[in-house]
Image (cartoon, rainbow, N blue to C red):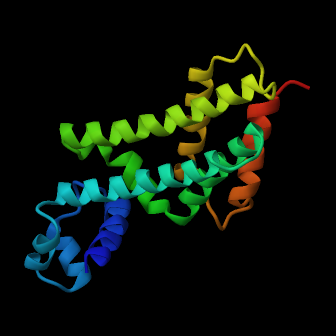
Amino acid sequence: MKEKIIEVSIDLFGQNGFIETSIQDIVEALGVTKGTFYYYFKSKEELLMEIHLRYIEDLLLSQEEITNKTMTSEQKLFDMVYMIMKHIEGHGQSARVFFREMQHLNEEHLKNIFNKRDLFRENMKQLLYQGIKDGEFREDLNVDVVTLAILGAVNWSYHWFDPKGELNEKEVTAIYIDLILNGLKK
């Protein structure tokens, strides 16, 4: 039942927003009582935190798997961007809830999520540094800005990416990587 509560809540938060979705809306969608909800979660915010933790921890686990592979930094970067795009494709509402509803977490919960988000960013930075060290990427890169640019572009995809659209997540990833590695110059 806990999984069903989370699943339904992600859909409702994604469609209507966290504030606009009540616990009553959640239990009505499930056909259960509020007591069932409170058996698993103390509050709607605790539920939101669970959704956030699952999202970021899943990304961190996937990122670690990519980091531990034996391949070039360029391939790892492709795989990381693809992993984020694939995650957005497969967990679109979770991504929407993660980015849009984070503001509704209390300070302690936000700190926990920010620490995990910062770890994800730091891991990507280290990948870029490794690529520079190995001679794959330019030595004059501002790794902080490049990391934020990559994550900003890819993370924003949840707003516009349509997995049933003209391009799939692998094709969008290839465009991102080409832009990141080759820029716009002829």
Q: Is residue 111 above or below residue 174?
A: above
The image position of residue 87, as x and y in percent, is: 55, 58
Snapshot quadrant of residue 51: bottom left
Determine whether, in the image, residue 183 is placed left or right of residue 104: right
| Left or right: 143 in relation to 91 | right
Residue 56 picture location, percent across and down: 42, 50
Report which quarter residue 103 is drawn in: top left
Q: Quadrant of the C terminus?
A: top right
Q: Specify whether 143 is left or right of 122.
A: right
Q: Is 186 situated above or below 92?
A: above
Front residue (pair 88, 56): 56
Q: Is residue 132 left or right of residue 24?
A: right
- Considering every residue shown, the one lying at the far top of the view is 140
Which one is in front, 96 or 138?
A: 138
Q: Provide residue 7's location: percent of width, then percent of height.
A: 35, 72
Residue at image position (77%, 26%) is 137
Q: Is residue 97 visible?
A: yes
Residue 33: x and y in percent read 11, 82
**Residue at the location (17% across, 64% down)?**
22
